[in-house]
Amino acid sequence: MTGNGARGLAADGTIAREGSPDRVAPEFAPVVEATRSRIVAAFGDPSAGSSRLHSAYLYGSVPRGTAVPGRSDLDLLLALRGSSGPGDRATADALGRALDADFPQIDGVGVLVFDTATLLSELERYDLGFFVACLCTPLLGEDLAARLPRYRPTSLLARETNGDLARLLPLWRDRRAAATTDAELLRLSRHVGRHLTRTGFTLVMPRWGGWTSDLTEAADLFGRYYPSRADQMRLAARTGRTPTTAAPTLSLLVDELGPWLAAEYARVHGVKTPRP
């Protein structure tokens, strides 16, 4: 189970930060060290006031200690001083490509880039703010979690983290139609499987009263409350772990489970606050 205590909660009932440097497996320690030094080389040392970088974070399976060598990706968040631009995105993409090429332990690198004002904004308090405070592990610089609240598994948190599925479904269909290679379909099916599973979990999260990022556990918890959709959600979790190019699987997830889940989510928790 994810987290430091029962149901991923701290002693006070708030959601515990799920990752830690101590949980990084030995196989991934060289990757993390190289990541730290290369971020500084690319964006500057955050301890220097002139650096573009305010802080950097790991998230996902590597800091949770569940990464599988050769199969798991490396996920990073960079928080910048001031607004980010195309140059920052290009630098982050180059950083990710180089790490992916140099370390066979990882299968892909994802780098999110945001400015600190956005991460700390009221609009993002229960989405990106929660993400930083509970799902990200500090790697460099000042930890923004110190400026964010403690979070509980509420309907508000559910709505703001995953209440936008209806908006995503047409984008997934467009990506499916435009895909011309197996690699594109594999990336899409992994993304769809993970997102649907996490959305299914947060749908039931306030009733269960805890937090997990484990896809298998998330699907099983969802199935307790929606047994008629349990098999479909377990399929989503399997696809998130082991993506497929099979058209029937992607069709079931995007065209059947997805629309039902979006409608049920809106009924139970409402729709995510629109972003500019």
Image: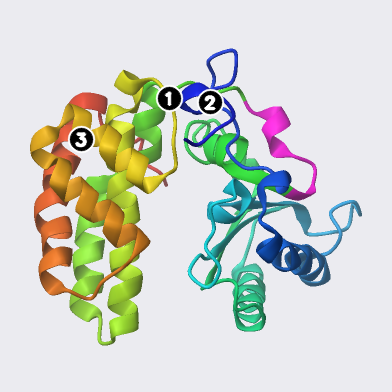
Instruction: Give the total of numbered labels.
Output: 3
Which residues make up the magenta segment?
Answer: 139-148
Q: Which residue is mark 1?
A: 210
The numbered disc on residue 84 is none
Identity of the amino acid at label 2?
Ile
Q: Earlier in the sequence, mark 3 or mark 2?
A: 2
Residue 57 sits above or below residue 35 on the image: above
Residue drawn 80% across the image and 42% down it: 142
SS category of the residue bearing label 2: loop
Q: Which residue is mark 3?
A: 223
Q: Is residue 261 visible?
A: yes
Residue 237 sits above or below residue 146 on the image: below
Q: Is residue 261 left or right of residue 29?
A: left
Measured Cα–Cα span from mark 1 to mark 3 = 15 Å
Percent from the top left, x then y, of residue 94?
A: 64, 79
SS category of the residue bearing label 1: loop
Colour scheme employed for the rendering of this structure: rainbow
Graded by Cα atoms within 10 Å as few (under 14), some (14 to 19) or many (20 or more), the crowding at tag 2 reads many
Percent from the top left, x then y, of residue 106?
A: 57, 71
Q: Quadrant of residue 111?
A: bottom right
Q: Residue furthest bottom?
A: 180
Q: Is residue 55 left or right of residue 99?
A: right
Graded by Cα atoms within 10 Å as few (under 14), some (14 to 19) or many (20 or more), the crowding at tag 3 reads many
Whether the magenta-drawn stretch holds residue 146 is answered as: yes
Measured Cα–Cα span from mark 2 to mark 1 = 7 Å
Whether the magenta-drawn stretch holds residue 152 is answered as: no
Q: Which residue is mark 2?
A: 15
Percent from the top left, x then y, of residue 41?
A: 82, 71
CB of mark 2 within 8 Å of CB of mark 1?
yes
